[in-house]
Image (tube, rainbow, N blue to C red):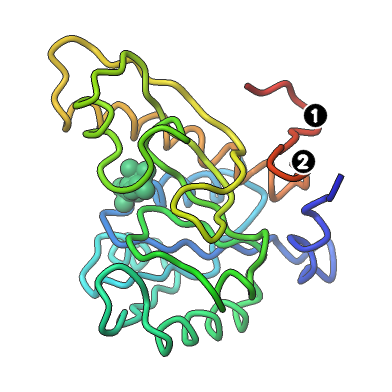
Amino acid sequence: MKFLGCRLYENMVSAENKFRLAVLGSGKGSNFAAIADGCTQGIIPAEIAVVVSDVADAGILDQAQQRGIAGEFIPPGKFRTKLDEEAEARLVTLLTGSKINLVVLAGFMRILKGEFLRAFAGRVINIHPALLPAFPGLEAWKQALDYGVKVTGCTVHFVDQGIDTGPIIAQETVPVLAGDTAEKLHARIQETEHRLYPRVIAALAAGKIAVNGRQTIWLDEPHS
Ligand code: GRF
């Protein structure tokens, strides 16, 4: 069994040094807000060192500013779905310089591959608004509604080279109700995201999650 702690904690030099998070997002930042609250309330034993967005006027950057957390806009470059080489290199330099232990994707709409994943191997997580492996990709709540499933939810997973394919850390279910619209369903999924993501990050920061191939193991609590 490989303990993530080896890499996750490599920048920690003493007990006073907190576990450092970078949060990357392109949108309104409600997950960032839940994580930031978790840190200030002591539920997550970590601090958010930096927030990064590929969208200059993203709500997540305003939220970071309101909380006095460093926010950075990185112009994504010429591609629509990924960062160009220069932007990716800038991101790696920023996060390496900020001595980040864990990179938290919270609605970041660019695919991260290659150099970035090599630099932060095993240290990047994402939250997806469906029960993976069902409905990967965009607007997963809408995909679930259109398909007609009765239960959907959210998934926190490690990020690998694929689209929403990395090892699953935790999932929470959400029932699809009669009369749901895409907006109503997404709002209920987001409520669960705001509980689940802080809980997973707290466990990772405390070294309570191990990974063995595709299996992740919660070391001190039963978890479905
Ligand atoms: C969330 O629904 C998350 O699952 C998806 O993007 C959305 C981000 O929302 N990956 P917010 O910006 O955190 O409010």
Is residue 170 something one can see in this rendering? yes
Provide the secondary structure element on which disc 1 rests: loop
Left or right side of 10 for 128: left
Q: Is residue 39 above or below residue 52?
A: above
List x then y, in percent, for residue 103. 56, 62
Name the residue that disc number 2 marks: 208
Provide the secondary structure element on which disc 2 rests: loop
Amino acid type, residue under disc 2 in the picture: Lys
Residue visible at 70% across and 62% down in the picture:
18
Name the residue that disc number 1 marks: 220
Is residue 30 something one can see in this rendering? no
Residue visible at 62% across and 21% down in the picture:
224
Amino acid type, residue under disc 1 in the picture: Asp
Q: Quadrant of residue 98?
A: bottom right
The one nearer the camera, 133 or 192, is 133
| Label 2, residues with CA under 10 Å away: few <14, some 14-19, many ≥20 | some
List x then y, in percent, for residue 192. 41, 29
Residue visible at 35% across and 53% down in the picture:
107
Image quadrant holding the N terminus, namely: top right
Q: Earlier in the sequence, mark 2 or mark 1?
A: 2
Residue visible at 31% across and 13% down in the picture:
150
Q: Is residue 59 above or below residue 170?
A: below
Mark 2–mark 1 CB contact (< 8 Å): yes
List x then y, in percent, for residue 126. 49, 50
Left or right side of 177 for 173: right
Q: Quadrant of residue 180?
A: top left
| Label 1, residues with CA under 10 Å away: few <14, some 14-19, many ≥20 | few
Give me the disc on residue 173.
none
The one nearer the camera, 20 or 218, is 218
